[in-house]
Amino acid sequence: MYDFKAYPDDKQIGKVAEALVTKHPCLREPGSDTGWNGWKTSIKFKMGNLRNKMRKIGCLEVAVNAGKRSQGHPENEPSHSKIKKPRWSEVNYLPNFPQGEDEASLETVRQEIAVEVQKTEKNTTLIHKNMEKTFALRRKNIVSGSPSVNEFLNLWPALRMTSE
């Protein structure tokens, strides 16, 4: 799968299973109608195991949806069964930070944006580039912090600009 996603849909998993059997005909299942239904199921379980590993190493997109309450850890969140992956415009959408960036480095970029917005001659291209770079930090603030609109606009003054 060249286009890797944490939550592939049923069609995408079916295409991968079909491509696997097409590439390696010896893997075809003689009992199934398509020849790759069992592989489709195996890939679904493999993706679930992979999401579990991604959650443990700190992938934010998967960690938001993972609840692991147990007898040993009753303080944890309950399991989020049948949860759907949040999309771009939905409330719980939480992308990972850009490559090579962490929360502290993105916070310094946020402060640079605040300084640039206060100038009389603003560099709008720099502001726009930095706002795109800090999108994941803004989403993290919204999803985990739940700030009021006023607090959020004070943190991100560039959002008041008409260009943003």
Image (cartoon, rainbow, N blue to C red):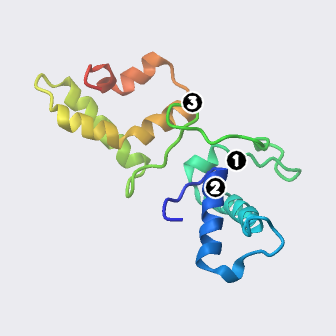
Q: Secondary structure at mark 3?
A: loop
Query: Which residue sits at x=55%, y=55%?
Result: 5
The furthest residue to the right: 71
Q: Which mark is residue 66?
A: 1
Count the numbered circles shown.
Answer: 3
Give the mark nearer the N terminus: 3 vs 2. Answer: 2
Query: Which residue sits at x=39%, y=51%?
Result: 98
- Determine contact: label 1, label 2, CB under 8 Å: yes
- Determine contact: label 3, label 1, CB under 8 Å: no
- The location of residue 27, given as percent across then percent down, is 71, 79
State the image quarter where residue 159 is shown.
Answer: top left
Q: Nearer the viewer, mark 3 or mark 1?
A: 3
- The location of residue 136, given as percent across then percent down, is 44, 41
Q: In the rendered view, tell whether residue 153 sits above or below residue 89.
A: above
Q: Nearer the viewer, residue 124 or 28?
A: 28
- The location of residue 40, given as percent across then percent down, is 71, 63
Q: How far is the residue under mark 1 from the one under mark 2?
A: 7 Å
Q: Secondary structure at mark 1?
A: loop
- How packed mark 3 is, by other alpha carbons closer than 10 Å (few <14, some 14-19, many 20 or more), is few
Does the image show residue 52? Answer: yes
Query: Which residue sits at x=67%, y=44%?
Result: 65
Q: Which mark is residue 89?
A: none
Q: Is residue 78 left or right of residue 8?
A: right
Give the mark nearer the N terminus: 3 vs 1. Answer: 1
Q: Nearer the viewer, residue 9 or 93?
A: 9
Residue for badge 3: 91
Q: Is residue 141 left or right of residue 105?
A: right
Residue for badge 2: 55
